[in-house]
Image (cartoon, rainbow, N blue to C red):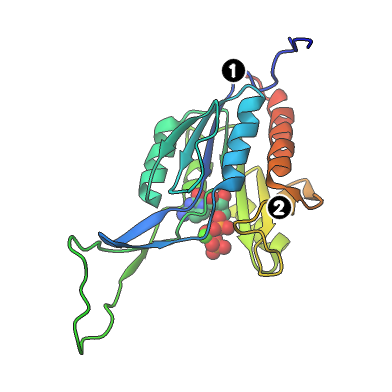
Amino acid sequence: ALLDIRPKPLAGRKIIVTSGPTHEPIDPVRYIANRSSGKQGHAIAAALARLGADVHLVSGPVGIADPAEVTTLHVETANEMKDAVEQLLPADAAVFVAAVADWRSETSAGEKIKKVAGEGPPALQMIENPDILAGVGHHKKRPSLLVGFAAETQDLVRNAEAKLAKKGADFIVANDVSHEGGVMGGDRNRVRIVSKAGVEEWPEMSKDEVATRLAALIAERLKTITV
Ligand code: CTP
Ligand code: CA
């Protein structure tokens, strides 16, 4: 076979990717989480690495293997994910695919909370987690290219456009996660790429194909940005 000696388009570029859910503890045996397999985020990390990028994947708890040729950091909570991401700055680009839990229990009990007859369920006091994407979008070390995801069950494009503006991202990959969409945990995905330039609709394809196309788009955009 012929050896491909063309330089890889993302060689020399450092890219941060978040993937998977976060787990927010209630006590040593219980947690609050989002549904996320990590498949799409891990596939994006792998696709960026195939284009030569120095990829740092910050992964919540998932049941899939670390991607090849990627530096993977494992975290549990949103706060741990935020700290890991900020430690990794500066970077040329960041892609935030993780389904971060929006809220956590304000306190995590040191011991397992027991059912007590007649007392009923414990009242959990919830507090909001930090928004990692918005924090990086407004950070002094903001990467020159910032990509977020938006999981929606309704008003997909309108919600994605609002997130683009509020979080300071360059692209939002908008994802229909309504029951009809059937994306969660599956191997296929249908996304729209929302940016200031408008909305680009991609046909339904595998999560690996979405990853390959998104990595190519990122390479194309970074080409116009000098190191
Ligand atoms: N995100 C994040 N940190 C959070 C919440 C979300 O970094 N605490 C990122 C996600 O990784 C994703 C984007 O923000 O790239 C949008 O996440 P999403 O849950 O769709 O948006 P929210 O702003 O949390 O709004 P809501 O869940 O109410 O739709
Ligand atoms: Ca959310």
Q: Is mark 1 within 8 Å of ligand 1?
A: no
Closer to the N terminus: mark 1 or mark 2?
1
Residue 107 seen in the figure: yes
Q: Is residue 115 left or right of residue 95?
A: left
Relative depth, front residue between 150 and 74: 74
Asked where in the image residue 221 lies, by quadrant, the reply is: top right
- 119 in relation to 140, above or below: below
Q: Residue furthest bottom?
A: 118
Q: Position of residue 227 (x, y in %)?
A: 61, 19
Residue type, label 2 = Arg
Which circle marks residue 134 in the picture? none
Q: Position of residue 161 (x, y in %)?
A: 68, 56
Q: Is mark 2 within 8 Å of ligand 1?
A: no
Could you give the CA–CA distance between mark 1 and mark 2, rounded to whole angstroms?
31 Å
- Say which quadrant the N terminus sits in: top right
Are the residues tagged 1 and 2 within 8 Å (C-beta)?
no
Asked where in the image residue 210 lies, by quadrant, the reply is: top right
Camera-side mark, 1 or 2: 2
Q: Which residue is mark 1?
A: 12
Residue type, label 1 = Gly
Relative depth, front residue between 11 and 76: 76
Q: Is residue 141 left or right of residue 162?
A: left
**For numbered disc 1, what is the local secondary structure?**
loop
Relative depth, front residue between 142 and 96: 96
Q: Is residue 204 left or right of residue 172?
A: right
- 36 in relation to 51, above or below: below
Q: Residues within 10 Å of mark 1 (few under 14, many from 20)?
A: few
Which circle marks residue 188 in the picture? 2
> Looking at the image, which residue is at 21% across and 86% down?
119
Q: Position of residue 65 (x, y in %)?
A: 50, 39
